[in-house]
């Protein structure tokens, strides 16, 4: 086994594509690392991956020393698209039917 040290916003899917060439390795990664598919992974976490898995895509990423991170940081704001299809980030929800600025 080998390890992948996670970078900012890197997901299990990113790691699977990098090391396995597709998302088929996701469940192997989850099982070997006791992590969830829907959880954020802390930067610098060592993730065990199977180095014996061979694919052209994975080999290319290894040769290029390519890291991908397709996640996005969790927003500290509560932005909403309203029922009118307009973006509004200055108001608050009063209930499920009313928007108050």
Image (cartoon, grey):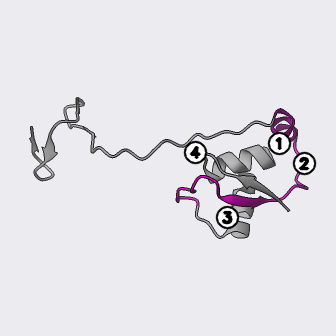
Q: Based on the displayed image, in which of its 4 quarters is residue 61 positioned?
A: top right
Q: Is 18 or 77 nearer to us in this picture?
A: 77
Q: CA distance from mark 1 to mark 4?
A: 20 Å
Q: CA distance from mark 4 to mark 2?
A: 26 Å
Q: Is 64 or 13 nearer to us in this picture?
A: 64
Q: Residue furthest top?
A: 86
Q: CA distance from mark 3 to mark 1?
A: 18 Å
Q: Which residue is mark 1?
A: 58
Q: Is residue 7 left or right of residue 89?
A: right
Name the element at disc 4.
Answer: loop
Q: Which residue is mark 3?
A: 30
Name the element at disc 2.
Answer: loop
Locate the C terminus and report the quarter of the image it occupies. top left
**Residue drawn at the location 80% of the way across and 49% of the way down:** 20
> Mark 1 vs mark 4: which is more N-terminal?
4
* Above-or-below relation of 78 to 85: below
- Residue 35 lies, in percent from the top left, at 61, 66
* Above-or-below relation of 44 to 35: above
- Residue 29 lies, in percent from the top left, at 72, 61
Q: Which residue is mark 4?
A: 8
Name the element at disc 3.
Answer: helix
Q: Which residues are magenta?
A: 37-64
Q: Which residue is mark 2?
A: 54
């Amino acid at each position: 086994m080998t390890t992948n040290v996670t970078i900012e916003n890197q997901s299990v899917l990113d790691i699977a594509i990098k090391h396995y060439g597709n998302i088929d390795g996701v469940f192997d990664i989850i099982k070997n690392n006791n992590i969830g598919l829907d959880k954020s992974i802390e930067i610098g976490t060592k993730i065990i991956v199977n180095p014996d898995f061979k694919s052209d895509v994975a080999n290319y990423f290894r040769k290029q020393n390519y890291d991908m991170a397709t996640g996005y940081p969790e927003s500290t704001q509560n932005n909403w698209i309203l029922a009118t299809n307009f973006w509004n980030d200055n108001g608050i929800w009063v209930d499920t039917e009313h928007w108050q600025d």
